[in-house]
Image (cartoon, rainbow, N blue to C red):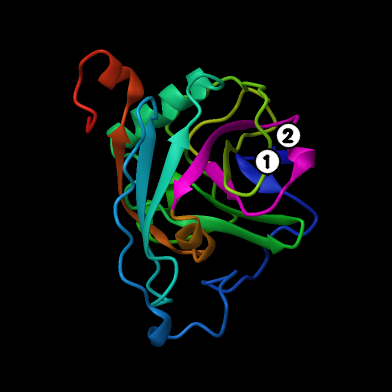
Amino acid sequence: MKLKSSWIFVALLVVGCSPNEGSSSSKTQALKRPPAKPYVPKPGETVVKFTFETTTDPVLGNGDVYIRLLTEDAPMTCAHILDLVRKGFYKGILVHRVMTELNFKITQFGNAATKDGTIDQNRPEVGSGVSVPREPNKHKHVAGAVALARSDDPNGGDSQLYICFVDIPHLDAGYTVFGEVAQGLDVAEGLGKGSKVMDCSVVQDAKAVGAGGDKKK
């Protein structure tokens, strides 16, 4: 399997999908839950937060997704993502890919070309312009894993990341798993094409805390 133009390419590539692909048709306002309490990072954790809005669904796909970064096993990738989050790179970006096969369920975002509010599969995808080498490690594509999408170049990963909802072992050898969802996997599962990143922030940077810095940097 390859990723072309930093997006996952499979035989079942999304074509003509509805704006809220991957969401259950049985969701109603009555199911709406109160906002989850903020995630409190444990000592030594580096955590980033993405806040999503899904206007086509009043129940799911709205709220915060906290991602614990695997800084020791994917240091270059994690440093790159931290830098992008600090710069607010992801604000306004749309979820542009949702795959819902039983053995291939992912949600993907990070294409800066979607900041204009549209998703066009024929338009070149845009990242930050800085790529990072692939970092093979012990972490697998399991439910809750977060990995970096890339182009045909094994070292061509940049800003696009995807969240796994099932085990996808055939991706293990080709892509860097650099994080795991610490809280908000239910929010991530409710995202559809067109869901928007409203905000992003570094909740805690273990390196900064260890150096006596402010953990909210």
Q: Which mark is residue 141?
A: 1
Which type of secondary structure does the marked residue at label 1 adopt?
A: loop
At x 64%, y 34%, the residue is 151
Q: Give 69 or 52, whichever is nearer the viewer.
A: 69
Residue type at the position of mark 1: His
Q: Which residues are magenta?
A: 161-183
Q: Position of residue 185 (x, y in %)?
A: 50, 55
Q: Residue at x 42, y 31 (%)?
A: 81
- Left or right for 15, reference 18: right
Q: Is residue 21 left or right of residue 44?
A: right
Q: Residue at x 60, y 69 (%)?
A: 22
Pointer 2 local density, CA inside 10 Å: few below 14, some 14–19, many at least 20 = some
Asked whether 94 falls inside the magenta stretch, the response is: no
Q: Which residue is mark 2?
A: 172
Q: Is residue 197 visible?
A: yes
Return the x and y of residue 6 as percentages of the image width and height: 60, 39
Q: In this rendering, is residue 168 above or below 153?
A: below
